[in-house]
Amino acid sequence: MKEGAVMSEVILNEEEKKNIELPFAKNTMIPTVCVNICDRSKPGFIVPVLNYSAAGNPINTQERFEENIFIPESFDKDKRIIAVKIKGNSMKDIGVNDESVVLVKTGTYFKSGIIGIVNLMDDQYEWGTTCKKIVYENGHYRLISLNGEKNYEDRIVKAEEIRYVGEVIGRYEGIYD
């Protein structure tokens, strides 16, 4: 992607617009942010794409810069978005596949039922990152995979074993036009 390129617009259909505000169900797709990376006519801002987050079992990652992408200003005026590349297919049912780039709104309060990025502590006290549907139940968090083709077990974690990074609000797709 050329430095200084600006996205032209966010393309959301009416169904996707409704889904942004609702807790995600198994059959819900996250909105796709299609951006014409060759159009420099609209204002936007740079978002760094950070290292991988697993869609399956958490992976231990160091925060690492991958590349920059440009997001239209109309998508998020607060500019509290990071982009994270996903590794794995356990979130396939909502359109997040291996190598997808998801847009994550940071600085938000956790709401039970959202799709989010979290850091989890493993049994060796190492932190790993994963993308899951997150449900708070009885003092614990249930992490749910959304891939109907495989029968992934939900993971239950204690509050002290999880750190909330942010809510997944879309999937980025750069297009050349």
Image: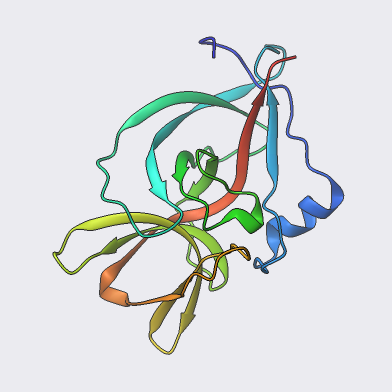
74 relative to 157 in the view: left or right: right
- Residue pictured at 71% horizontal, 18% vertical: 42
153 relative to 33 in the view: left or right: left
- Residue pictured at 61% horizontal, 63% vertical: 149
- Seen in the picture, residue 19 relative to 170 is either above or below; the reply is below
Observer-nearest residue: 122 or 70? 122
- Residue pictured at 54% horizontal, 43% vertical: 102
Quadrant occupied by the C terminus: top right
67 relative to 160 in the view: left or right: right
As drawn, the residue found furthest toward the bottom would be: 138
**What coloring was used for the rendering?**
rainbow
**Figure quadrant of residue 24:** bottom right
How many circles with numbers are drawn on the protein? 0
**Figure quadrant of residue 72:** top right
Observer-nearest residue: 63 or 55? 55
Observer-nearest residue: 160 or 155? 155
Residue 49, image x, y percentages: 44, 32
- Seen in the picture, residue 168 relative to 149 is either above or below; the reply is above
- Residue pictured at 18% horizontal, 69% vertical: 123
Residue 56, image x, y percentages: 43, 58
**Figure quadrant of residue 162:** bottom left
Residue 30, image x, y percentages: 67, 52
Quadrant occupied by the N terminus: top right
As drawn, the residue found furthest toward the right would be: 14
Residue 88, image x, y percentages: 47, 49
